[in-house]
Amino acid sequence: MQFLYLIISLVVVLADQGLKNYIVAHYAIGEIHQIIPGILSFNYLQNNGAAWNILTGQMWLFYIISIIAISVCLYFLFNKKYKNTLFDVGLALILGGIVGNFIDRLHLKYVVDMLQLDFVHFNIFNIADSAITVGVILVFIYLIFIEGKEEQHD
C-alpha cells in the first residue's frame, strides 16, 4: 500500500515541476495572466525564502529542514504502527510538496511560485505549497478526530 502513497507523492512532484517549468519557459518574472477571471491568475515569482518570504536567502536552513521533513514523512509512511488512509494520504501530499520545492531550491536556489488568488489578497504559491497545506490539514484531522479512537474500537 505504501507504493500507492509514493505514487501520490510522485504525481504531486510531477505536476508541480511541470507547471513550474511551463511558467519559467513562457513567463517573465512578475508577468500576470488571468486563468479564471476574478479567481485565479498565473504570476511568476522567484521566492528565495519560505512562506511569506520569511528567512530570505537561508538556503542551507531550507536544505536541512527539507531533508529532515522528507525523512520524517518516509518514516511514518513505512512504519506499520501508523496505518490510516487519511494520515497516509496527508503524508504523501506533504512529501510530494516538500520534494517539489526542494528540487527548486537545489536546482535554482529559489522556489518558483505562480498561483495567485484574485479574490483575496494572499501570497503567491505553487502546487507543492498547496499539497503541503492540504496534507497538513488531513494529518491534523486524523490526529484530532481519529487517532486514539481507532484503538478504542479494537
Image (cartoon, grey):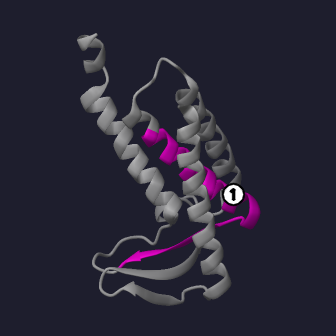
The three-letter code of the residue at mark 1 reads Ile
Q: From the viewer's perspective, is 51 left or right of 58?
A: left
Q: Does the magenta portion include 93?
A: yes
Kindly identify the residue that appears in the image at 66 percent across and 66 percent down.
110
Q: Is residue 47 visible?
A: no
Judge by depth and name the residue closer to the eye, 103 or 30: 103
Measured as percent of width and height from the top left, residue 86 is found at 37, 36
Judge by depth and name the residue closer to the eye, 151 or 60: 151
Q: From the viewer's perspective, is 51 left or right of 28?
A: left
Q: Is residue 126 visible?
A: yes
Circle 1 packing at 10 Å, graded few (<14), some (14-19), many (20+), is some
Which type of secondary structure does the marked residue at label 1 adopt? helix
Kindly identify the residue that appears in the image at 36 percent across and 42 percent down.
138
> Splitting the image into 4 quarters, where does residue 150 fall?
top left
Measured as percent of width and height from the top left, residue 70 is found at 61, 40
Q: Main secondary structure of the magenta part?
A: helix
Measured as percent of width and height from the top left, residue 127 is found at 50, 63
Which quadrant of the figure contains the C terminus? Answer: top left
> Splitting the image into 4 quarters, where does residue 59 fall?
bottom right
Judge by depth and name the residue closer to the eye, 45 or 2: 2
Q: Does the magenta portion include 57?
A: no
Number of numbered discs: 1
Residue range in magenta is 89-117
Image vertical order of residue 11 relative to residue 25, above or below? above
Residue that carries the numbered disc 1 in the rendered image = 103
